[in-house]
Image: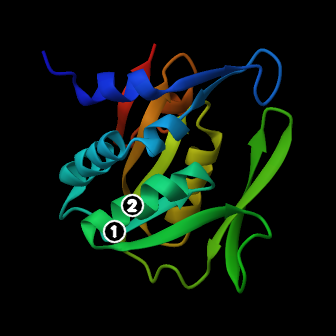
């Protein structure tokens, strides 16, 4: 019996306990990236769902760059990175948002959008949803239209999906 894509991805995810801090079970996606057949299948699956409905892919730093750039290439559209503050050269537009303990700022290039572009936002894991929510707000602020959010893994026991309420979300693997 052949495995579903979710089963193939799940078989390659690696759990790293206590990373990046104690009591965190980190979902390492690098074994998925190392398997060209599974990685290619993930990108084709995401592309097939979005073909013709988006103008640009936006990837969230850092692993969202890997999935986002490959997906943009597969779709024949451009790629725009969302980065932590101070990492992009030139003029940027930023948004500061609250974290559990403190704040963070994300940025995009100020000339990345003219307004009205249909955007697919991509990251590797949807967990608490803070950065994804902030990225959506930043894209809304510059006039882009976030069509959907794609992720490889969703940690459903965390509030990420709720923070993106009203947005279309697709995860290849959902961890209950």
Callout 2: helix, strand or loop? helix
Name, please, the residue furthest toward the left. Answer: 1
Residue drawn 76% across and 58% down? 105
Check contact, mark 2 vs mark 1: CB within 8 A.
Answer: yes
Picture layout, residue 23 above or below residue 48: above
Q: Is residue 136 visible?
A: no
Side of 87 where 137 appears, left or right: left
Residue 35 percent location from the top left of the image: 40, 41
In the image, farthest residue toward the right: 102
Q: Crowdedness of circle 2 by 10 Å Cα count: few (<14), some, many (20+)?
A: some
Gap in angstroms between the C-alphas marked 2 and 1: 5 Å
Q: Quadrant of residue 115?
A: bottom left
Q: Residue at x 50, y 36 (%)?
A: 31
Closer to us: 65 or 110:
65
| Coloring applied to the structure | rainbow
Residue beneath label 1, please? 73
User: Which labelled disc corresponds to residue 70?
Assistant: 2
Q: How many numbered markers are drawn?
A: 2
Q: Nearer the viewer, residue 167 or 46?
A: 46
Disc 1 crowd, CA 10 A, few/some/many (<14, 14-19, 20+): some
Query: Helix or strand or loop: what does disc 1 sit on?
Result: helix
Residue at (70% x, 67% y) in the render: 94
Instruction: Decide if residue 88 is on the left or right side of residue 75.
Output: right
Q: Position of residue 1 (x, y in %)?
A: 12, 15
């Amino acid at each position: 019996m052949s495995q579903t894509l979710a089963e193939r991805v799940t078989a390659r995810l690696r759990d790293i306990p206590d990373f990046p801090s104690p009591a965190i079970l980190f979902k390492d996606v690098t074994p998925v990236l190392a398997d060209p057949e599974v990685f290619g299948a993930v990108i084709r699956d995401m592309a097939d769902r979005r073909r013709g409905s988006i103008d640009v892919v936006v990837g969230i730093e850092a692993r969202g760059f890997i999935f986002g750039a490959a997906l943009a290439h597969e779709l024949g559209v451009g790629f725009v990175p969302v980065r932590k503050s101070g990492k992009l050269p030139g003029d940027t537009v930023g948004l500061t948002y609250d974290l559990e303990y403190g704040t963070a700022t994300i940025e995009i290039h100020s000339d990345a959008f003219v307004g009205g572009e249909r955007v697919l936002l991509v990251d590797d894991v949807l967990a608490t949803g803070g950065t994804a929510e902030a990225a959506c707000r930043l894209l809304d602020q510059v006039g882009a239209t976030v069509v959907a959010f794609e992720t490889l893994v969703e940690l459903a026991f965390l509030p990420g999906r709720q923070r993106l309420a009203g947005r279309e979300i697709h995860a290849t693997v959902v961890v209950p």
